[in-house]
Image: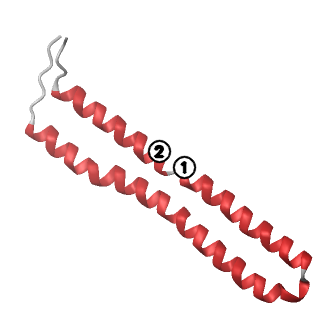
Amino acid sequence: MKKRDDHSQVEMLEGAKLMGAGAATIASAGAAIGIGNVLSSSIHSVARNPSLAKQSFGYAILGFALTEAIASFAPMMAFLISSVFRSQVLIFIKQAPLSFQP
């Protein structure tokens, strides 16, 4: 078996970091579905009982806000993954000299 050099390990770490940041943004699709469900339920409840429209609207806004909070955590995690782990990779590169053999 051929032993991997330090450069290939750094490349694998960078690739895993990018895949993790991409996977963290999948939560945006779930949040969009959740917002659609909240607004759909609000429309159905007002259609069934129009006298409770004002109270139902408050609950719909609360559900919308909580679902949107989940959507704001997804990019935050993606930026966290891509920026925090970058400094450790650069430190690793500076400590380990690269040696290329053709």
The residue under the point 59% across, 68% down is 68
Q: Quarter of the image holding residue 45? A: bottom right
In the shown orientation, is residue 41 left or right of residue 95?
right
In the shown orientation, is residue 32 left or right of residue 79?
right
Q: Mark 1 is on which residue type?
A: Ile
Instruction: Tell me where residue 86 appears, x and y as whole percent.
Output: 27, 48
The residue under the point 22% across, 50% down is 87
The residue under the point 66% across, 62% down is 34
- Of residues 23 and 59, the one nearer the viewer is 59
Q: Quarter of the image holding residue 63? A: bottom right
Q: Quarter of the image holding residue 4? A: top left
- Of residues 55 and 8, the one nearer the viewer is 55
Q: How many marks?
A: 2
For label 1, the crowd category at 10 Å Cα-Cα, with few meaning under 14, some 14 to 19 and many 20 or more, is some
Q: Which residue is mark 1?
A: 26
* Residue 17, above or below 57: above
For label 2, the crowd category at 10 Å Cα-Cα, with few meaning under 14, some 14 to 19 and many 20 or more, is some
Instruction: Tell me where residue 67 appears, x and y as whole percent.
Output: 60, 68
Contact (CB < 8 A) between labels 2 and 1? yes
The residue under the point 72% across, 68% down is 38
Local SS, label 1: loop
Q: Mark 2 is on which residue type?
A: Gly
Q: Which residue is mark 2?
A: 22
* Residue 19, above or below 57: above
Q: Quadrant of the N terminus?
A: top left
Instruction: Tell me where residue 73 appears, x and y as whole percent.
Output: 47, 63
Instruction: Tell me where residue 102 appears, x and y as whole percent.
Output: 18, 10
- Of residues 94 and 19, the one nearer the viewer is 19
- Of residues 12 and 67, the one nearer the viewer is 67
**Residue 11 marker:** none
* Label 2 – label 1 distance at C-alpha: 7 Å
